[in-house]
Image (cartoon, grey):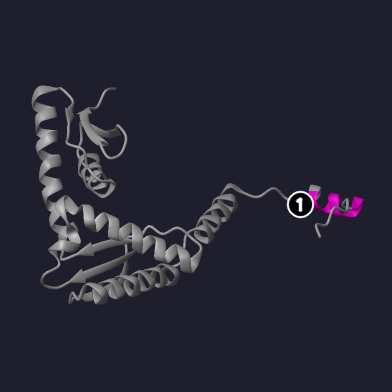
Amino acid sequence: MTDTSIPSADQSLDEDTAPAATTEEAEEAQSEAREKKAPADSDLFRQSEIAADYVEGLLDILDYDGDIDELVSGGRPVVEVVGARLQNLVGQRGATLEALQELARLAVFRQTGSPSRLLLDVGGYRAARRKELAAVAKNAVEKVKEHGEPVRLEPMSAFERKCVHDVVNAMSGVESESEGVEPNRRIVVRPVTD
């Protein structure tokens, strides 16, 4: 039952006469509140363990061999699967990998009750794709700087768009934004306008 009592005069007087929190104290309180909202590394590692168990069960059903590593990287749970004959788990342009990642996130959600930002990688696909996308982003930036016109890239997954945004945001004189709706969401790189 909720306490709906009215504070006594003494209570409100104490609260009213308490010194106001300093800016530093307020910032510290906000920082603590953010830390409470963000999952601890142990919670993130638990998410990667749940996802790894799910992926291991899937590999058993498919009769695929692979070594599974669970870790926390960049403040998010990560599961990496390494082995031969895993290309089918990646699919064309990573489409199957994206679907498996969503299934693994769902497995985490079912056990924890919380959504997960889990990142699943199979056979080093994401690391290799990240390098390819860095080259695509740099090429787009060069074109924008050379011609002064926006460059629209091909539609990409959320992971791919993030990789490109990270590269573009690290360069001066250009900016990027996503436009469109899935599955045709793409990045536009344009010169910075003052």
Q: How far from the left and from the top, in percent, is residue 107? A: 40, 65
Q: Nearer the viewer, residue 150 or 152?
A: 152
* Residue at the extreme right: 9
Displayed quadrant of residue 46: bottom left
Q: Main secondary structure of the magenta part?
A: helix
Q: Nearer the viewer, residue 14 or 108?
A: 108
Q: Is residue 80 visible?
A: yes
Q: How far from the left and from the top, in percent, is residue 59? A: 24, 73
* Left or right: 14 as drawn, with respect to 67: right
* Left or right: 75 as drawn, with respect to 140: right
The C terminus: image quadrant: top left
Q: How far from the left and from the top, in percent, is residue 151? A: 16, 29
Residue 121 inside the magenta-drawn segment: no
Q: Which residues are magenta?
A: 8-15
The N terminus: image quadrant: bottom right
Q: Nearer the viewer, residue 38 or 23?
A: 38
Displayed quadrant of residue 42: bottom left
Q: Residue at (15%, 62%) from the top-left corner? A: 88
Q: Is residue 76 visible?
A: no
Circle 1: element type: loop
Q: Report which residue position mark 1 lands on.
A: 18
Q: Residue at (49%, 60%) from the top-left corner? A: 114
Q: Nearer the viewer, residue 181 or 126?
A: 181
Q: Is residue 26 above or below residue 73?
A: above
Q: Residue at (45%, 58%) from the top-left corner? A: 115
Displayed quadrant of residue 122: bottom left
What kind of residue is marked 1?
Ala
Q: How far from the left and from the top, in percent, is residue 8? A: 91, 53
